[in-house]
């Protein structure tokens, strides 16, 4: 039988591969597109939606199988009953249809052209957005599947596991445990994995104090604090369990200049407190 560490590594490799392949396919399809005409819009949607949907469903299957195998190693007989039709489609982005989401890169090209940029530069900018959008959707599928599976398996806590490429914020956040009822805040290109915490492997609230005290993490925290001194005050958010829990965690780590905000489509996000979501045209993904 595979060990928990081996299962984590195997699922992480497959997760990276899904995202890598999706990025390559997205940019290939985008480069075949041409100008931002209505006809090309339809061609783009017909090509990209099945590709992204396939990557999302592969992610649902991967995370479900990983958590099923891991829980079995711990003697749990319940099954992670995750319904792809519930967590994907419009449900992935709080009701926004995928067709609307994947029109945005074309609209970006048109906007860039209207601002006076060349066609080549406008297409390049739109392509960057297309790849980021597809990658974000796989992250959302990963998070939604884990959340449903944790509930089905009866886990109360989980931890986020960074990789060797993870940013300092993710490294710091990975030193804490989280309640499974709170969706994991993400950010662009976030590559954290998830591991449920179960009885005998529960380390308590602080998981890795040594990591938290590593020089590069502390220096990053100190640098953020210095830069915050020149920023305008943060606007007040409406209270909510995910947002408040995320804020308390970040404050406990000394990361008061980074906050968790509820994005209208993407859910809880790790963001700079000076960044505000004002509408569909301002969505990063």
Image (spheres, helix red, strand yellow):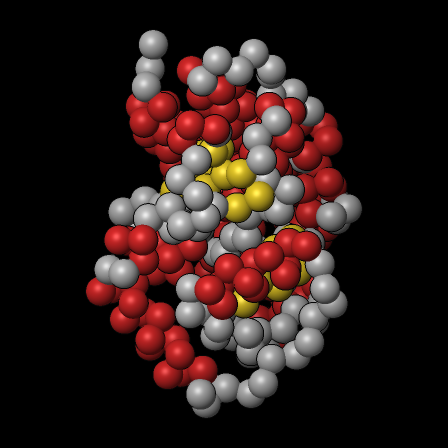
Residue at 46% in and 64% down: 252
In the depicted view, which residue is nearer to us: 25 or 12?
12
Give me the residue at 40% from left, 40% from top.
203
Viewport quadrant of the N terminus: top left
Residue 246 or 204: which is nearer the viewer? 204
- Residue 131 drawn at (x, y percent): 49, 50
In the shown orientation, is residue 193 left or right of residue 265?
left
56 versus 258 height, above or below: above
Q: Nearer the viewer, residue 168 or 206?
A: 206
Hey, which residue is sitting farthest right in the picture? Answer: 95
Q: Position of residue 11 (x, y in %)?
A: 40, 28
At horizontal 49% and vertical 67% (from top left) the residue drawn is 251
**Lateral position of residue 125 relative to residue 172, left or right:** right
Regarding residue 183, the answer to whether it shows in the image is yes
Q: Say whether residue 23 is left or right of residue 265.
A: left
159 is higher (above) or lower (below) than 279: above
- Residue 114 position within the rendered picture, expressed as x and y whole percent measured from the top left: 62, 75
Where is residue 8 drawn, in percent x and y?
Answer: 37, 29
Above/below status of 191 relative to 259: above
**For the C terminus, which image quadrant?**
bottom right
Q: Nearer the viewer, residue 82 or 195?
A: 195
Relative side of 17 to 93, left or right: left
Residue 71 vs 30, above or below: the answer is above
């Amino acid at each position: 039988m595979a060990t928990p560490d081996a299962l984590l590594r195997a699922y992480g490799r497959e997760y990276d591969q899904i995202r890598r392949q999706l990025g390559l396919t997205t940019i290939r399809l985008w480069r075949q597109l041409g100008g931002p005409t209505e006809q090309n819009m339809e061609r783009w949607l017909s090509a990209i939606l099945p590709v992204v949907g396939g990557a999302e469903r592969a992610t649902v299957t991967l995370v479900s199988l990983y958590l099923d195998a891991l829980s079995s190693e711990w003697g749990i007989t319940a099954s992670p009953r995750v319904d792809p039709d519930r967590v994907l489609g419009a449900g992935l982005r709080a009701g926004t249809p995928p067709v609307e989401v994947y029109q945005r890169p074309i609209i970006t090209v048109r906007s860039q052209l209207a601002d006076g940029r060349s066609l080549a530069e406008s297409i390049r900018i739109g392509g960057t957005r297309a790849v980021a959008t597809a990658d974000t959707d796989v992250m959302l599928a990963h998070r939604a599947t884990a959340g449903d599976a944790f509930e089905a398996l009866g886990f109360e806590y989980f931890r986020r596991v960074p990789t060797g490429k993870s940013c300092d914020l993710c490294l710091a956040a990975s030193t804490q445990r989280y309640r499974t009822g709170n969706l994991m805040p993400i950010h662009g290109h976030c590559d954290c994995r998830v591991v449920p915490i179960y009885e005998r492997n529960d380390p308590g609230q602080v998981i890795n104090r040594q990591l938290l005290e590593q020089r590069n993490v502390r220096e990053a925290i100190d640098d953020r604090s210095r830069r915050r001194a020149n920023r305008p005050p943060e606007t007040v958010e409406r209270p909510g369990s995910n947002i408040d829990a995320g804020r308390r965690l970040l404050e406990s780590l000394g990361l008061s200049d980074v906050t968790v905000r509820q994005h209208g489509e993407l859910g809880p996000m790790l963001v700079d407190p000076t960044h505000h979501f004002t509408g569909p045209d301002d969505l990063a993904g």
